[in-house]
Image (spheres, rainbow, N blue to C red):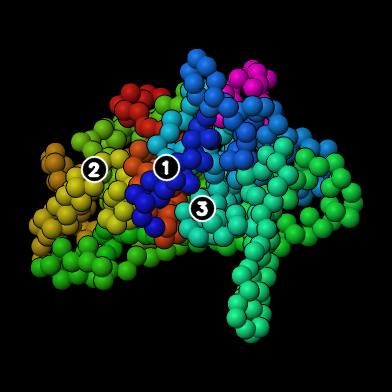
Amino acid sequence: MKYASLTSSTGVVSRTRKIAEYMKKEHDLSNEAEAYPSSMRGYKYSVGVSDAKTEWTSPSYEKQFKDPQQLITNEKIWNCEGELLRSPGAEWLKDLCLSFALFWMLLRRFGGYPICESSHEKTWRFIHDGLFPSHDDEFECERAFKVIEVELNFLYDYFTSIPDTAQKYLNLDYYEESGQYHTVNTEVSLTQIVLIAITGLELVQIGILLCLDWSKVLWLCIYVRKQLWKYKFIEMMIGVACCAPWSFKRWKRKLDQHSLLHDLCHLCPKRCHCLVSPFIRVRRVKLSKQVKKAVATSIQRINGRRFPNGAASLQRNGVGQLSSYCQMETQTHVILVWHIATSLCEIHFQRSARSRSAGKKTACSDKFHVATLLSKYCAYLVAFAPELLPNRVTITRGIYHRVVNFEAKNLFKGCNFTNESKNKKLMAVSEEQSPAILEKGARLGKRLINEIREEAMRWKVLADFWAELIVFLAPTENIRAHAEHLAVGGEFITHIWALLTHGGILERNNPTDNVAA
């Protein structure tokens, strides 16, 4: 998927223009003070506007919708009186339509249009009180990330061939006054065999399309509009169609993992630069509920849409003296220094595991899991996907290569590259202030081990730090990078980026502004 061709295509430009025009006026269609995200009251996010009738209006001479109130919105779907959307277990149908509406809204970033609603308070409350009403509720965390996952699935489909084919048969962008549907016209071929084959393929294709999420949204939009569709038999048929298990998963819900210290084990000491070789395998682990919950908690704690790069979590946990390790030349420095420190704590944790009672091990296992997974995922982003991080790609790559090619080679000279030997080398690093990233990470690791004696507390500090840092790293204007990674399955940081976009957070603030936040 080529980003340049996507953003220049007529379909993307025309559709995102209509979305952008509608969202300019969406705020005026309801009272912000009465907006209630749990029931979507006051959130008139359109499920589709491409067929909506527009007209030129003065004095701005911009195209405006003739009757915006006639659009099918999430507010109408949430408050539909039909039994299908009122029955227990129907929440996922509403969330499907919400994902579709958010998908249309996110398209504006790919089309270069402004996110007009980002300045409104109700936009942030949509994330804070709507998707994450309680960060302690694992179900709510799962639901929020599921909404974003389905949204990005729609986005992936839109940028590939599925929507083009689907819209040949289905009017996906439903407008209440539109009652027209596309029909299938198949040219008769010269022989009956070819005709039967083509017809069979068309029927199979239509059958598949009718089971896709795109089609389910269409049925639900028609159901909300037409009173005749609210009969028991029709509701049952729609329910069966919507429950069809034909939903393609583009994202595997995996986190790529890269450990700088561990991967040095597999290299010849004289050729440390081979670490960035394509032959180094990136390990993938399942994205757990614990990680999602930790990230959700960090998003909930954002105050005034300004958030720090880990410093606030350190102060909350009583180790504010370590905040200086969050104020470095670049965010790449911060990631690598804390990654080295976390790796040292991990080695120390594993080495003392034999003498640790089962109860204590269980007490910090979740925090250990969150901290190590997010640490290695951020290290993976530095090494293999720097375009998704705040700094310029050339700067991030230059810093990483210097750490691998020069710092590691000098520090581990004569080392047999086992975990134990590397740990000894790093723990023996002098306390003198050196600008080397490996040595800074070693000093931070020693401070974490020596100053936070309780294992459970140490891993809580690290888990909270990494969850806060990855939320800080997510906002970016590099839309091209997210589009290209989405084409090959997507990244977890893209999901956080989309979440924050819908909360009105389009860019990160200066971390030094919020050290005391």
Tell me the crowding category of disc 3: few under 14, some 14 to 19, or many 20 or more residues within 10 angstroms, Cα based.
Answer: some
- Alpha-carbon distance for marks 1 and 3? 12 Å
Quadrant of the image for the C terminus?
A: top left
Q: Earlier in the sequence, mark 1 or mark 3?
A: 1
Q: Earlier in the sequence, mark 1 or mark 2?
A: 1
Identified at 49% across, 35% down, the residue is: 17
- Alpha-carbon distance for marks 1 and 2? 20 Å
- Alpha-carbon distance for marks 2 and 3? 29 Å
**Amino acid type of the residue that numbered disc 3 sits on in the rendered structure:** Tyr
Residue wearing tag 2: 392
Residue wearing tag 1: 110
Question: For numbered disc 3, what is the local secondary structure?
Answer: helix
Magenta span covers which residues?
A: 22-42
Disc 1 vs disc 3: Cβ atoms closer than 8 Å?
no
Locate residue 74, reporting x and y percent. Answer: 67, 37
Quadrant of the image for the N terminus?
A: bottom left
Regarding residue 259, the answer to whether it shows in the image is yes
Query: Residue 307: within the magenta?
Result: no
Between 39 and 172, which is closer to the camera in this rendering? 172
Residue wearing tag 3: 158
Locate residue 250, reporting x and y percent. Answer: 51, 60
Between 467 and 442, which is closer to the camera in this rendering? 467
Q: With 326 as the anchor, is 209 left or right in this view?
A: right
Q: Which of the 4 image quarters holds residue 36?
A: top right
**Amino acid type of the residue that numbered disc 1 sits on in the rendered structure:** Phe
